[in-house]
Amino acid sequence: MNQPLQNLSMRPLEMDNEFRFSDEELILRFQKGDEQSYVELVNRYRDRLINYIYRFVSDIESAEDIVQDAFLKVYTHKHYYKQIAKFSTWLYTIAGNLAKTELRKKKTRKVTNLSQIGPKDKDFELPSVEPETDKVAQNEYIEKRIQIAINKLPLHFKTVTILRDIQEFSYEEISKIVDVPLGTVKSRINRARLQLQIELKDLKIGDSI
Amino acid sequence: MNRYQFEDSISAYLDNDLSISDRKLFEEYMNKNIDAKNLVDDIRSTLKSTKNFSNIKASKDFMPNLFKRIQFEKNRPVKKIIEKPSKSLFGFTPLYATLMSILVISFISIGINMWPQSILMDNSASAFTGDINPPNLNIKDINIKSQPQVLVSKEAKSDSSDTTIINKKNFRLNSKVQLVKDRK
C-alpha cells in the first residue's frame, strides 16, 4: 500500500461509474495510507483547480504553483479533513486562501511575469464582428475582456463570481467555501454581476458566442 | 417594483428562483423599461460566455514536480528538540503550577482583606481569651478620657523624618456598656 509516489500510476484510475469511489471515500482511504487514492484525487481536481486559481492570479505558472501548494497541504495535513464537509469544499478553501495570499504578495511586489502579458501589452487586432470572422478568436477576445473586468472586482465579489459563474458551484457550496451565509452569497453574486456589466458596457457579446 | 428591487432580483430571475408573483412583477417592469431589459440580456450573455471559457490544462511537469515536493517534505530533516522529561502536577508543569498557586493564594488573601471589617470584628470576639476585669477595679468608675495618646520615641523627637509615631484611637466607655460579670 505504501509505495513510493513516483511508482504509482499518474493516470486516473479507470473505473466504471458504479465502482467509482467518491472523493470522500478516496480521502478516507488516503488517510489510512493508500497513496494511489491521493493520486486519483489530484488527477480529478488538478485541471479544475488550475482554472479556478488562474482566474484569480491571471498567470498560468503562478496558478500551477499555488495548486501544487494546495495539494501538498492536502498530503501533509490529510488528517485535518473531517467528513462534516465535502472534500471539494475543503480543497477549494485551501486553494482559495493560498490564492488570496499570493494576490496580497503581488500587490506589495509589483512584479509582472512574462506569462502575464495580456492584450494591453502586445499588439492585438480587434476582430471584426462580421459573421465570417473566426469565432474562436472572437471568443478569446471576449474571454480576455471579461477576465479583465473580473480582475477589477473587489476580492469578495471576484471570489463568488469565479465560483458561481465559471466553476459552477451551487450557492450552498459557495457559502461553505467562503464561510459566509447563503443570503450574503446570493447578494454578492448579484451585485458582482451588476458591477461586471458596468465594466463591460461597451462590449457587445450578442450572437458572437 | 422599483429599479432597486428589480436589480436585486436579476440573479434570482436568471436562476429561476423567483416565486410566480415576483416573476410576474419582474417581467412587467422589464417589459416596460428597455434599459432594464437590455441589462438582463447583457448579464445573460456574459454568463453564457463565462460558461464557454477555455479550459486550462496542467503542464506535463505538474505531477513530477508535485511528487518531488512531496518527497522533499517527507525527507526534510526535522529539528529534534531534546526535552527534559518534565514531571507534571495535575497536568501542569512545575513552573505553571507555581504561578497558578501564587495567583490562587493572592486572590484568597485579597478576598480576605476586602471582607467587611464588621463581620471580622463580630467573629473575632470569641477569640479573646484575656480577662478584661482587673481584680480590684470597679468598671463603672473608669472614665477614660478621649485624648489621643501619641507614642513618640526619644529619637523621633530630635529627628523629624522618623515615622514611628503611633496614634491611638479615641475610645470611651460609658454607662451603657455593661460587662457580663456585672449582670445579676
Image: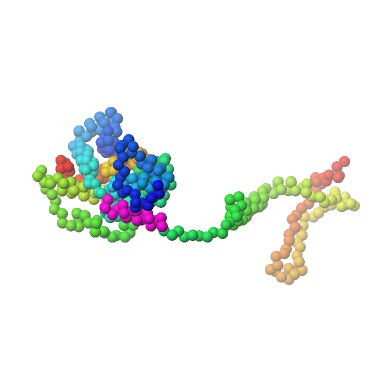
Image coords of residue A125 (percent x, y): 13, 53
Image coords of residue B117 (percent x, y): 69, 49
The structure residue drawn at horizontal position 43% and vertical position 45%, both measured from the top left corner, is A32
Q: Is residue B176 magenta?
A: no
The structure residue drawn at horizontal position 67% and vertical position 50%, both measured from the top left corner, is B112
Q: For residue A24, which quarter of the picture?
A: top left
Number of callouts: 0
Out of B73 and A156, give the one closest to the viewer: B73
- Residue at the bottom extreme of this rendering: B158
Q: Is residue B72 magenta?
A: yes
The structure residue drawn at horizontal position 47% and vertical position 60%, both measured from the top left corner, is B79
In the shown orientation, is residue B95 left or right of residue A29?
A: right
In the shown orientation, is residue B35 left or right of residue A70?
A: left
* B24 in relation to B104, above or below: above
- Residue at the right extreme of this rendering: B136
Out of B165 and B117, give the one closest to the viewer: B117
Report the coloring of the rendering: rainbow
Magenta-drawn segment: B58-75
* A132 in relation to B68, above or below: above
- Quick one: quadrant of the C terminus of chain A? top left
Out of B110 and A120, give the one closest to the viewer: A120
Image coords of residue A64 (percent x, y): 30, 53
Out of B103 and A71, give the one closest to the viewer: A71
In the shown orientation, is residue A114 left or right of residue A171?
A: left
* Magenta-colored segment: predominant secondary structure: helix
The structure residue drawn at horizontal position 38% and vertical position 50%, both measured from the top left corner, is A3
* A61 in relation to A40, above or below: below
In the rendered image, is residue B152 in sight? yes
In the rendered image, is residue A154 in sight? no
Image coords of residue B128 (percent x, y): 79, 50
